Image (cartoon, rainbow, N blue to C red):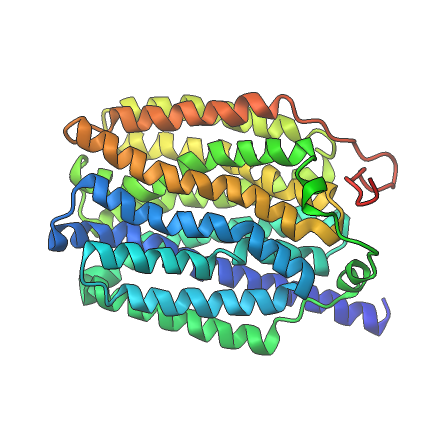
Amino acid sequence: MNTAATVNSKNKYLVLGLLCLGWIINYFDKVAINVAVIPISQEFGLSETQVGLILSSFFLSYAIMQPIGGTLADKFGSRKVIIISVVGWSLFTILTGTAWSFLSLIIIRFLFGIGEGSYPSASSVAVAESFPQHERARAKSILTSATTIGGVLATLVAASLSKSFGWQSMFVILGIVGLILALLYAKFLHPTGSQAAAAKRTVAKLPLRKLLKISMLWKLMAIYFGISMVTWGMMSWMPTYMVKVRHLDMVSMGALASIPAILSFVTVLLTGWLLDKRMVGRERLLIVIGSFIGIISLYLMSKAPTVTLVVAYQALANVGLAAAVTTTLTMPLKYIDPSSVGAASGLIYLGGQTAGVIAPTAMGFMIQQFNGSYDAAFWLLIIAVFIPFVVGMTLRTTAQVGNEPPAKVSTSN
């Protein structure tokens, strides 16, 4: 291997490591509110519906920013968009700790979503800029696995910080960590390898009107919506469920929440390897099978008589849905022209974050209407998983032939 190739190889793994770190901190800041709403709701006297609105306000702006951030990353490069995003969300994380009322929390969390919303699609662009096509599924799966690490640590760390220092100081501490990350990015994040150069040589990006005509993107949006209904619904309400219904203390709840997340981490990495090595052109099988596992497991979880079985079935659901979501988020990197990866990823993320707007509020409303019972709320999640199960069956891709890359949607038509 020549010197230039060696440098580029080292750089792409540095970029990937920094992006993973960003996703972990991203999840710390995002998930902390799900733990903090327990003392916040007591302090401000909030109902379940009001708690759901606070959680959903973030996802409204977060969803809006997904395609915008992706388009900006396609146009200006991922580095600038990522750094601005990290600084923005860190400042609003700190500001969350100064909230004084229900309305102030709604406004601050909405602004927080604007700051954080560009990061997911911009990080996908950074992967496309740094890795060749045949390595992107594994690189993206590693990024996705970082979100599970964030999930493992965030609930436990947030619960511990909130208990030790109060929820206000918890947000200040997490925001400062984010600002330190921004400094690291400014110095070390340079996704400018040979893949970035190739992307810059692309003659034209796919116009939005043509991007919206690609049926695969609409299907992936729908699939990600269904999966994300479960992701954000569970992330928003499982801490409260485990404390109020299953009578765990906050630290024990955080520790048990790490078990499903750890299994998700392993599943995501295995799925990335399968997508690059064994499932090219057959990605829909992972989505359909994973969704089926999710449906059965969520039903069993809703009926589980003990905490042990709740955690076990939640872990099994996470395994199935982790395989499905990793496949969904990887497909734009494999089948969409590199010049439009950011915009395409942003549209798919838009589907997922729309679920983030709906799930927390809808579940909170159902819990309140049914006098604290979570049965109807869990059924909402079970029904949502039928979307990726059914839509996944209709996905069509072109399998890899010999050493040729997979057929991808071109900008020329």
User: Which residue occupies 53% across, 58% down?
Assistant: 119
Q: Name the spot of residue 152 as percent of width and height, x first.
A: 39, 50
- Residue under the point 18% across and 54% down: 40
* 8 displayed left or right of 107: right
Image quadrant of residue 6? bottom right
- Label tally: 0
**Residue 276 in which image quadrant:** top right
Q: Nearer the viewer, residue 2 or 179?
A: 179
Say left or right for 161 vs 331: left
Residue located at (77% from left, 54% from top): 132
- At x 38%, y 55%, the residue is 30
Horizontal and vertical percent for residue 273?
66, 42
Q: Position of residue 185 (x, y in %)?
A: 56, 72
> Looking at the image, which is closer to me, 100 or 240?
100
| 38, above or below 360, in the image | below
Q: Which quarter shows the C terminus? A: top right
Q: Is residue 253 left or right of residue 396?
A: left
Q: Nearer the viewer, residue 177 or 104?
A: 104
One can see residue 270 in this view = no
Q: In the image, residue 381 lies at what x, y percent?
A: 38, 29
- Image quadrant holding the N terminus, namely bottom right
Residue 328 in sight from this viewpoint: yes
